[in-house]
Image (tube, rainbow, N blue to C red):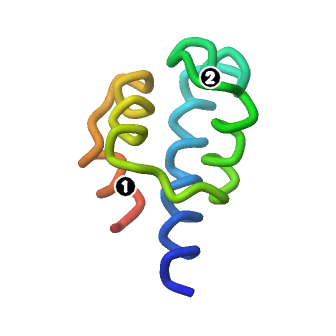
Amino acid sequence: MVEHTNQAKLADVIRAHRVALGLSQEGFADHIEMHRAYYSKIERGEKNVTLATLERVAVGLGTSMSALLLAAEL
């Protein structure tokens, strides 16, 4: 499934950015005011994120949506 592959690629990029910032999943989820369980599903590629959610995550990571998508080669 292409969609799952794209979700997994994006999830890997998001996780890598968070880890590079030295933040835990819980700490980052709190920072962007998102439930930790929901954020965890994003990082596992289980959620097909909306543009609004992707923007929220990108801003929290100090980057842009386009940078995340480019890094995921999407």
The local crowd at label 2, few if under 14, some if 14 to 19, many if 20 or more residues have their Cα within 10 Å, is some
Q: Is residue 25 left or right of residue 54?
A: right
Q: Amino acid at mark 1?
A: Ala
Given residues 30 and 62, the one toward you in this image is: 30
Q: Is residue 66 above or below residue 32?
A: below
Q: Is residue 63 above or below residue 30?
A: below
Q: Is residue 36 left or right of residue 14?
A: right
Quadrant, the N terminus: bottom right
Secondary structure under tag 1 reads: helix
Q: Is residue 61 left or right of residue 31?
A: left
Q: Is residue 54 left or right of residue 28?
A: left
Given residues 16 and 2, the one toward you in this image is: 2
Please state the horizontal and vertical placement of residue 18, each as a whole percent of the image. 57, 31
Please state the horizontal and vertical placement of residue 12, each as a whole percent of the image. 58, 54
Please state the horizontal and vertical placement of residue 5, each as a whole percent of the image. 55, 75
Residue located at (42% from left, 38% from top): 53
Given residues 17 and 45, the one toward you in this image is: 45
Which residue has dot 1 on it?
71
Q: Amino acid at mark 2?
A: Ala
Q: Earlier in the sequence, mark 2 or mark 1?
A: 2
Q: CA distance from mark 2 to mark 1?
A: 21 Å
* Residue 29: mark in rendering: 2
Secondary structure under tag 2 reads: helix
The local crowd at label 1, few if under 14, some if 14 to 19, many if 20 or more residues have their Cα within 10 Å, is some
Residue located at (62% from left, 22% from top): 29
